[in-house]
Image: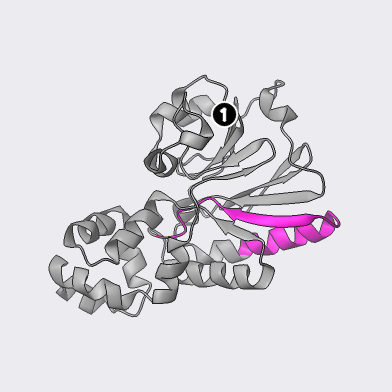
Amino acid sequence: MLNRLLRRKKASRPIDSATIPDGRRVYAIGDIHGRNDLLRQLLDKIIKDDGDRGKAESEIIFLGDLVDRGPDSAGVLDTAMQLKADLGNVRFLMGNHEECYLAATTGDEKSVRFFNRIGGRETILSYEISMKEYIELDMAQLAQRIPELFPQKHIDFVAGFEDQIIIGDYAFVHAGIRPGVPLSEQRQKDLRWIREEFLSTQEAFEKVIVYGHTISDDVVETGTRIGIDTGAYHSDKLSALGLQGSERWYLDTAT
């Protein structure tokens, strides 16, 4: 399996010389997928870690896929919105699942069918709808129900997510980037959906790419890539990357 070929190596690599600007500290959180319980645990660890490390301009970046698959996507969005309100310096990347979430809120039956198939069922059920009502609705009826079921505050919040964040020598994206294409020219589709072409290339990128989207048992470091999607919705392990100066470290809910 491809991910087994991308395990962390201890030899010196370009990744080891990457830095972020002085005085800043960044935490990047991997794919949450509806696990509000794990998100709250990880945020507690991040806040403690941030306090233990002393003064800095700290920020948190969510790498996308906050929703779907896990049991409480609505709760994850509430937690994320509250965190943004409380701390301010919190940013969110648009994952492919957020893209599908927004498409489903238009009431388009085809979009709802696809959303439902990739984990949207659990998202829908995290709102004010019973399993009985959900089962009784056909797909056309469900498509009509979703726009009134999902709160506008959630829709507006998700619609404001970014596609790419660059800080120092790091670029944060959801899925990856298209090899051979400058960061400034990357397509939205690739930033949200790409997988094999990004993971299999041996090309060194212009920045260290921090991404989610592709599940691994543990954090993956290879070349100029760092992957931190550890499959929280089924593994109970939600992971985060910490960065300050030339340092990097990891936090997760399994330790």
Pick whichever, 158 or 64, lies toward us.
158
Residue 29 makes an appearance in the image: yes
Location of residue 233 by image quarter: bottom left
Pick whichever, 138 or 158, lies toward us.
158
Disc 1 packing (10 Å; few <14; some 14–19; many ≥20): some
> Residue 210 in the image: x percent, y percent?
58, 40
Q: Is residue 61 magenta?
A: yes
Question: Taking 183 as reference, is 150 left or right?
Answer: left
How many numbered callouts?
1
The span picked out in magenta is 41-67
Pick whichever, 252 or 161, lies toward us.
161
Q: Quadrant of the N terminus?
A: top left
Location of residue 84 by image quarter: bottom right
Dot 1: element: loop
Residue 253 makes an appearance in the image: no
> Residue 39 in the image: x percent, y percent?
57, 62
Amino acid type at image mark 1: Arg
Residue at (15%, 75%) from the top-left corner? Answer: 136
> Residue 148 in the image: x percent, y percent?
29, 78
